Amino acid sequence: MVFPKNIKPAEKAVAIFVALYSIGFSAWFLMIGNAEFIVYIITMAILIGLIGSSLRKAEYPPAILWALAIWGLLHMAGGGVPVGDKVLYAVQLIPIISDGQGEMTILKYDQVVHAFGFGVTAWLLWHLVVRHFPDVRGTWTAYTYPALAAMGLGAVNEIIEFTAVVIVKDTGVGGYFNTALDLVFNALGAIIAMIIVAAQERRRV
């Protein structure tokens, strides 16, 4: 594996972690013939490239990089770890709501990953906002824009899932209720993340 010369040790550790589980899950998905995975691995490769190419401009804190790496692992595991006749993504972790058919079911592993992932996304966007526009730090702008932008990226994620449905048969992505719940949990994760960031910022004052 070749790393940029200016990569920091913490960043290198994250990169190795991501590379190892990406290779492992890639091999697994190819072995079981999961064609849907190709769409997601391409998307993930693009995201890794964007983060990697902006390391020195953005100077992401190691905590954010590790959170992104864990999100990627949770995503891979969700689609690749079998649980009975399902995959991990379809597993209901806490029986809050269930329609008996799987669409209107809360709380699933998938929804937790959506909330976590787009919470991390909002956190990352907040970092970029306050880094490049330090005057807005501590204002509503610094918290509102990252939350809304994370929700927008969550919608892009649903477009990618729709693309997978169109290209690949039997993706298991789900229907209207699944998409709507994904968007709801994306929003919840983004909002909760900004509440936590705002609380931490106030403690520093």
Image: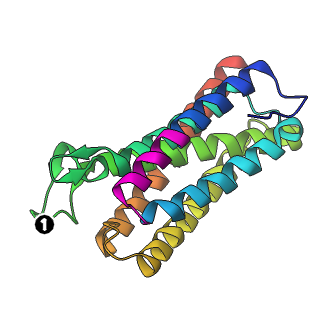
Label 1: few (<14), some (14–19) or many (≥20) C-alpha neighbours in 10 Å: few
Q: Position of residue 143 (x, y in %)?
A: 66, 45
Quadrant of the drawing holding the C terminus:
top right
Depth check, front residue: 48 or 148:
48
Disc 1 residue type?
Answer: Gln
Task: Name the side, left or right, on which 125 lies relative to 193.
Answer: right
Residue 7 among magenta residues: no
Quadrant of the drawing holding the N terminus:
top right
Task: Name the side, left or right, on which 154 lies relative to 79.
Answer: right
Query: Mark 1 = which residue?
Result: 101
The residue lying at 83 percent from left, 46 percent from top is 53
Task: Name the side, left or right, on which 50 lies relative to 25.
Answer: right
The residue lying at 60 percent from left, 60 percent from top is 42
Depth check, front residue: 151 or 77:
77
The residue lying at 74 percent from left, 50 percent from top is 49
| Residue 61: quadrant of the picture | top right
Mark 1: secondary structure: loop
Q: Kindly give the residue lying farthest to the left in the view shown.
A: 100
Q: Main secondary structure of the magenta part?
A: helix
Judge whether 203 appears above or below 141 on screen: above
Judge whether 23 appears above or below 20 on screen: below
Q: Kindly give the residue lying farthest to the front in the view shown.
A: 31
Whether residue 194 appears in this view of the structure is: yes
Residue range in magenta is 23-35
